Amino acid sequence: MFRRAAALTLALAFAFSLPIWADDSGDTKARIRHIRELGRGDSQSITALAGFLKDPAVEVRFEAVKAIAGIGTQYSLEPLARATHDDDSEIQIMATDGLVNFYLPGYAAKGLGGSFTRTTRLVRGFFNIRNDQVVDAGIQVRDDVGQALGDLVGLEVDTLEARANAALAAGILRARLAVPGLEAALRARDTDLIFEALVALEKIRDPSAGPAAAALAQDPDEKIQTLALETVGILRSVTSGANVRQALDRARSAKVRRAALQALAMIATAQDRAILLRYSADRDPQLRAAAIEGLGRLRDPEDMPTVEETFNEQNLDERVRLAAAFAVVMEGKVETSEFSALRYLVNSLNLKSHSGITQAYLTELLRRREVRQAVQPLIEEPTCTKDEKILTAQSLAESGAPDALPVIERLAKDTNPDVSVAATRSLRLLRSQLPIQ
């Protein structure tokens, strides 16, 4: 009689999609089977699956999160965000990967959750390789998602892998609401967590996080120290200049010295002009390039002879020449003659080894109207290459400027399909930044 009653209770629970843990007669394996069956459905199954997030059995909650993430619609986001607060770190990780997967399809298959069958050493090794993935700037991530990731990153409990994974996710999603949690993570003692938090702050680019990163400018771990300096520079944290100067003066290696000078070049304040001038003729190409780049950002007319002479110098390291070209254009010379600095930068987009640096320079320069106007004729010339068109369109889109719209629209109609597809994507990015009319 008891067995029949228990079976009836189990059947009714399945029929009405109630969490089976509501009755002690439901066993764990039966609940997991039901969850997997629901996971083969669509978003209508999510409400039932979400009920299992309170199940006392960890394996049941894990299967529920896995199923909800697998369905992967917008209705998955709220329960997944809730699941990041679970007490089990593997569930936190699975929920985090599921959140990213919604915005970046295919991510979960390669995320940390896919490493659970490996040894702890291999799981922790997951964070040794920098992940540069980010969602397109035009994608709006829900506030509850960003907040959930920030809450998990900022936890002061021993779930280091889950916290580092949440930091990684926050960076990929550019989740600004996660910044306070990421700043808290910088005070942790775990290198993986600090590393992922710094990378995430670089991707989110909230200048307010600069001082938190600058606090690590003297970190004894060189990997963390150099990344912290890099982050300060990318965030253009002017208030952190003193930390960076101190790191430059006390640099224990060439790597730290380069990172510190590059940060000062990014911040570019008049206070550091003497330092930049001192390194503008340095024998180390990376130090010299950073110094010249910084002088360009200062836009002091007295420095024009220095940057022009550097640009025209014979047998010059390519990295230094690119920095000099950038500086010349930053100083206001936007001519596009055959040997001009601006044309040189556009042409250098064809060099695979330096295209990333060149595009970063152009992206910064194209925020200025006069540079956008000067570049437009260049990318409409018959000799303009596919790479020049694609990368310039991306940089124009990141400017967020309305006058870039017709230029990218024409590139979206280019006869080369690679150009037209890439320009169409850039067009979506630009339009997402423009006011709705």
Image: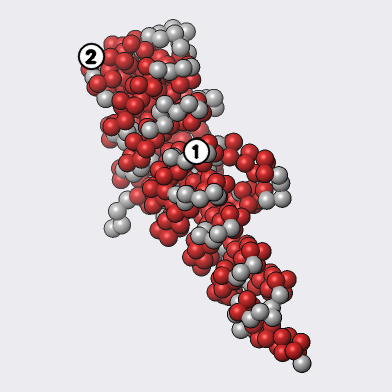
Residue at image point 40% right, 58% down: 143
* Residue 423 numbered tag: none
Establish if 311 lies above or below 137.
above
Q: Nearer the viewer, residue 288 or 231?
A: 231
Mark 2 vs mark 1: which is more N-terminal? 1
Q: Nearer the viewer, residue 29 or 159?
A: 159
Residue at image point 27% right, 17% down: 273
Q: Is residue 383 shown to the viewer in this render?
A: no
Say which element carries label 1.
loop
Establish if 422 lies above or below 247.
below
User: CA gap, disc 2 to disc 1?
Assistant: 46 Å
* Residue 189 numbered tag: 1
Other residues around mark 2 within 10 Å, as few (<14) / some (14–19) / many (≥20): few
State the image coordinates of residue 222 (x, y, percent, origin top left). 50, 25
Please name the amino acid that badge 2 sits on. Glu
Quarter location, residue 294: top left
State the image coordinates of residue 161 (x, y, percent, origin top left). 57, 46
**Quarter of the N terminus within the rendering:** bottom right
Q: Would you say 181 lies left or right of 353 here?
A: left
Q: Would you say 342 lies left or right of 347 here?
A: left
Residue at image point 64% right, 81% down: 23
Please name the amino acid that badge 1 sits on. Arg
Q: Is residue 295 shown to the viewer in this render?
A: yes
**Quarter of the C terminus within the rendering:** bottom left
Q: Nearer the viewer, residue 103 or 222?
A: 222
Establish if 283 lies above or below 199.
above
Quarter location, residue 308: top left
State the image coordinates of residue 299 (x, y, percent, origin top left). 26, 22
Instruction: Report which residue position mark 2 lands on.
Output: 302
Residue at image point 67% right, 40% down: 121
